[in-house]
Image (cartoon, rainbow, N blue to C red):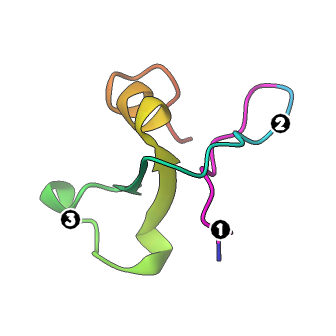
Amino acid sequence: RDGNRCTHRNNRGFRCPEKRWLDLHHIIPVSHGGKDTPENVVVLCKSHHLQHHEGVNPFS
C-alpha cells in the first residue's frame, strides 16, 4: 500500500524517497492500547522512525 517506501512527509509535503532500511511504526503503540493492524501501522525509514520516537516528527 505504501509502495515499499518511507511514508514520512516534510513540512512542504515532500515524501521521503528512502526504499531501504524500512521499519513498521505503530501510530498508537500496542503498549498504549493500539492494535497490531495495517490501519495502525506506517512504513518509515530508520532515520524517520527514530525521529518519531524522539518526538521530532510526531504524528498528529
Three-letter amino acid code at disc 3?
Gly
Q: Is 53 drawn above or below residue 5 in the view shown?
A: above
The residue shown at (63%, 56%) is 5
| Mark carried by residue 14 | 2
Question: How would you classify the magenta stretch by its main secondary structure?
Answer: loop
Mark 1 lies on a secondary structure that is loop
Q: Position of residue 42 (x, y in %)?
A: 50, 60
Q: Is residue 50 left or right of residue 33?
A: right
Q: Is residue 9 left or right of residue 14?
A: left
Q: Is residue 1 left or right of residue 44?
A: right
Q: Position of residue 1 (x, y in %)?
A: 65, 77
The residue shown at (53%, 27%) is 57
Three-letter amino acid code at disc 2?
Phe
Q: Specify start and end residues of the magenta stretch as a single range.
A: 2-11
The residue shown at (62%, 43%) is 18
> Which of disc 3 and disc 1 is earlier in sequence?
1
| Mark carried by residue 55 | none
The residue shown at (28%, 66%) is 34
Q: How would you rate the neighbour count of disc 3 (Cα within 10 Å): few for under 14, some for 14-19, many for 20 or more?
A: few
> Do the numbered discs 1 and 3 sit on residues whose CB atoms are within 8 Å?
no
Q: Which residue is mark 3?
A: 33
> Which of disc 2 and disc 1 is earlier in sequence?
1
- Depth-wise, is mark 2 or mark 3 nearer the camera? 2
Q: Position of residue 12 (x, y in %)?
A: 86, 27
- Name the residue at the front extreme: 20
